[in-house]
Image (tube, grey):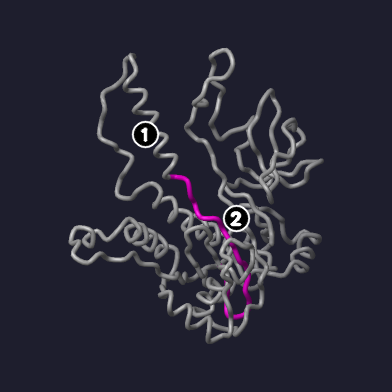
């Protein structure tokens, strides 16, 4: 594993080894900090060498899991196996049903208006591509990324369906939007699925059929091959350690529960702040170690495990919590 290094003005530099990072921290030459759950160091002096190599981020999209690899010609620095965003479609349906239910009640309400939330992309499609862009932006803050290599996916055309083929599909629209945004961060290249397959076979690498297992050869082998196609340098993976990233499900605008509680009252539900801490933030607790912020009740905060999401305690005091980093993911290493 490598430790990302930032200059004193927060410019990403080439990563270093954990042992060197420890020496810098011990001597006061660097300050440790966290970026979205990833341990980094920031130099307290001018860098003796600010030259950077070409670093590529290989991206392997998927319907359930997505893989990212940060690699140069010398080393593989970081592998991410992330869960894709699912469930947005169901949330939109619930919101629609609740809105329709309010309009048929015998109470004053505004008249129905055109749905202004749709825009050019369906919310479920946009959320999927936004995840790739979010992770890419985070990686660009930690590493001097110069390019992106993405496995290109395509929707099938329908013979004789002129109207369908004109706009193709929401998948194609979302892909075009994401590619345009990635191009602003660095050079963008794409490869077809069969090109990744051919290069993987040429290197003698195999891909597992168990897509939901937390293994390097489930998804990250393809993201590694994509990055290696851009920068070269290896004929086999030199770093197969992975970091699992699971997006947190935040209830941002749901003011209360849909069902009544005892006494005909609705329990509060929603919001992203717990007693001054943003939900999902990575913190350090004197009893439970590193974990993340959940909800709050009665002046106490719930803390959850980074690896499983299970609630560790619901009576943590704000004074016993040390803030480390904002985050909208939970993390653990594989």
The numbered mark at residue 44 is none
Q: Is residue 139 above or below residue 95?
A: below
Looking at the image, do the residues carrying marks 2 and 1 touch, with CB atoms under 8 Å apart?
A: no
Residue 116 at x, y percent in the picture: 30, 38
Q: Can I make out residue 5 in this image?
A: no
* Numbered disc 2: secondary structure: strand
- 75 relative to 24 in the view: left or right: left
| Closer to viewer: mark 2 or mark 1 | 1
Residue depicted at x 53% and y 71%: 223
Residue 227 at x, y percent in the picture: 52, 75
Magenta segment includes 75: yes
Label 2 crowding class (10 Å Cα cut-off): few <14, some 14-19, many 20+? many
- 229 relative to 108 in the view: left or right: right
Using the rendered view, name the quadrant where residue 296 is placed. Answer: top right
Residue 62 at x, y percent in the picture: 48, 62
Q: In this figure, which residue is indicated by the disc labeled 1?
A: 96
Residue depicted at x 56% and y 22%: 267
Residue depicted at x 53% and y 20%: 260
Task: Please tell me which residue lies in front, 43 or 203.
Answer: 203
Magenta segment includes 136: no
Cα–Cα span, label 2 and label 1: 30 Å
The quarter of the picture where the C terminus appears is bottom right
- 296 relative to 68 in the view: left or right: right
Task: Please tell me which residue lies in front, 94 or 134.
Answer: 94
Q: Can I make out residue 134 in this image?
A: yes
The quarter of the picture where the N terminus appears is bottom right
Residue at the farthest bottom position: 202
Residue depicted at x 73% and y 41%: 322
The numbered mark at residue 245 is 2
Q: Which residues are magenta?
A: 69-88
* Numbered disc 1: secondary structure: helix
């Amino acid at each position: 594993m490598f430790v990302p290094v930032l200059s004193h003005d927060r410019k990403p530099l080439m990563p270093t080894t954990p042992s060197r990072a420890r020496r810098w921290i011990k001597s006061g030459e660097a300050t440790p900090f966290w970026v979205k759950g990833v341990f980094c160091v920031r130099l307290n002096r001018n860098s003796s060498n600010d030259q950077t190599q070409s670093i590529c981020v290989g991206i392997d999209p998927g319907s359930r899991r997505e893989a990212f690899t940060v690699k140069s010609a010398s080393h593989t620095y970081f592998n991410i196996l992330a869960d894709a965003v699912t469930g947005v479609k169901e949330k939109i349906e619930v919101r629609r049903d609740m809105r329709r239910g309010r309009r048929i009640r015998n109470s004053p309400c505004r008249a129905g208006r055109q749905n202004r939330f749709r825009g050019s992309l369906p919310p479920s499609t946009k959320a999927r591509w936004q995840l790739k862009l979010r992770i890419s932006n985070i990686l660009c803050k930690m590493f001097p990324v110069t390019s992106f290599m993405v496995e290109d996916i395509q929707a099938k055309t329908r013979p004789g369906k002129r109207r369908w083929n004109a706009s193709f599909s929401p998948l194609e629209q979302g892909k075009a939007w994401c590619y345009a945004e990635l191009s602003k961060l660095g050079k963008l290249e794409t490869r077809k699925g069969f090109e990744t397959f051919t290069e993987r076979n040429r290197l003698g690498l195999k891909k597992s059929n168990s897509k939901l297992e937390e293994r390097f050869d489930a998804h990250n082998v393809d993201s590694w091959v994509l990055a290696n196609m851009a920068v070269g340098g290896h004929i086999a993976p030199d770093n197969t350690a992975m970091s699992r990233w699971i997006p947190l499900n935040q209830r941002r605008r749901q003011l209360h529960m849909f069902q009544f509680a005892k006494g005909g009252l609705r329990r509060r539900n929603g919001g992203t702040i717990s007693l001054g801490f943003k939900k999902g933030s990575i913190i350090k607790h004197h009893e439970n170690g590193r974990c993340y912020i959940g909800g709050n009740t009665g002046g106490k905060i719930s803390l959850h495990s980074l690896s499983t999401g299970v609630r560790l305690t619901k009576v943590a005091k704000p004074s016993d919590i040390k803030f480390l980093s904002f985050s909208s993911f939970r993390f653990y290493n594989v």
